[in-house]
Structures are given as structure tokens and as C-alpha cells.
């Protein structure tokens, strides 16, 4: 039997959390949920297994949800490591998906705000669901987004 649980947020760790916050607000309609976070202390060191961890950031309300819905949490640590850019077929979290009214228009907005396309806009019929128009894109820091429209 599963434990009782409620989904609360997804975290993105970025090099420039303020730039990512602006991107998700201006392009995809997220809304800042105060307060800004400025976190450190033994509890954070214990949680992260990092020494002298310090992070700043903010939660964003996601479009389509009220202010008590799940959030997108965007943080930056003072001490960051660098890794390879995420790819769609890598194990782990793959992408954040957003339902949009026009996939091509949304992709253009992502690109105009410093993001990029991963592939091309594609259309397929999903049996029992409908016609899907979809594209993978990247936010300004390379995180993968899925922009989708159903009809």
C-alpha cells in the first residue's frame, strides 16, 4: 500500500537563479511565490552532504494551478559544480512539460528569451487521447522543456 503523499515541487538548480526565474515567469507564465530563500546552516549541510552549503532562490507558482498548487523551485548554490548539458535519453529527470496554446509560438518565445530548440516541432495522433503537437526545447541554462498542445 502506498504511503500518503502529496506532490509539492520540482527543483531546478541553476547558475543564475534570477535569470531562470525571469525566463519561467516571462515566457511560461509562472508567478513568484514569496519569500525569496536564503538558506544555510548545519541542517542544510546535513541534508545536502555538502560542507558550508548556502543557497538562494525562490519558488514559482506554476501556470494552471492556484497559489497552493505545486511549485517550481529555482535555487543556486554559492559553490556549484559543472556537468554536461542534460539530454532527453539520460536516466533521471528528463524534462518539464507545459501545455501551450501554440507550440510554434511558444518555441519562438523560448528562443527569444535565451533558450533553444532540442528537436523539431512534431505532430502525432495518440490513440484514445487526440492529436499532439509537441517540441523539446531548452531554457537559458540548458534544462529541457516539453511544449505541447492537444487537439
Image (tube, rainbow, N blue to C red):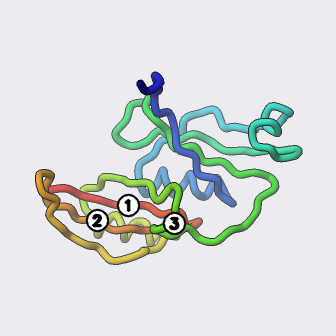
Tell whether label 1 touches label 2 (CB within 8 Å). Answer: yes
**Disc ID at residue 90:** 3
Q: Residues within 10 Å of mark 3 (few under 14, many from 20)?
A: few
As displayed, is residue 10 above or below residue 130?
above
Tell whether label 1 touches label 3 (CB within 8 Å). Answer: no
Query: Which residue in the protein does label 1 denote?
Result: 146
Distance (Cα) linking label 3 and label 1: 15 Å
**Disc ID at residue 134:** 2
Element type at mark 1: strand
Q: Residues within 10 Å of mark 2 (few under 14, many from 20)?
A: many
Element type at mark 3: loop
Count of numbered circles on the image: 3
Element type at mark 2: strand
Work out whether mark 2 precedes mark 3 in sequence or the reverse, and give the earlier one.
3
User: Which tag is nearer the camera, tag 3 or tag 1?
Assistant: 3
Which residue is drawn at the image coordinates 64% and 32% (left, top)?
Answer: 35
Amino acid at each position: 500500500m502506498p504511503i500518503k503523499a502529496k506532490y509539492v515541487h520540482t527543483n531546478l538548480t541553476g547558475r543564475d537563479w534570477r535569470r531562470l526565474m525571469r525566463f519561467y515567469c516571462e515566457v511560461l507564465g509562472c508567478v513568484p511565490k514569496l519569500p525569496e530563500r536564503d538558506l544555510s546552516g548545519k541542517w542544510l549541510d546535513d541534508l545536502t552532504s555538502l560542507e558550508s552549503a548556502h543557497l538562494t532562490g525562490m519558488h514559482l507558482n506554476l501556470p494552471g494551478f492556484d497559489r497552493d498548487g505545486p511549485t517550481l523551485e529555482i535555487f543556486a548554490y554559492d559553490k556549484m559544480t559543472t556537468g554536461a548539458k542534460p539530454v532527453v535519453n539520460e536516466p533521471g529527470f528528463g524534462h518539464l512539460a507545459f501545455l501551450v496554446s501554440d507550440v510554434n509560438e511558444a518555441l519562438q518565445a523560448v528562443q527569444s528569451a535565451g533558450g533553444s530548440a532540442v528537436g523539431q516541432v512534431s505532430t502525432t495522433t495518440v490513440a484514445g487521447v487526440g492529436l499532439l503537437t509537441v517540441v523539446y526545447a531548452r531554457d537559458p541554462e540548458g534544462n529541457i522543456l516539453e511544449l505541447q498542445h492537444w487537439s
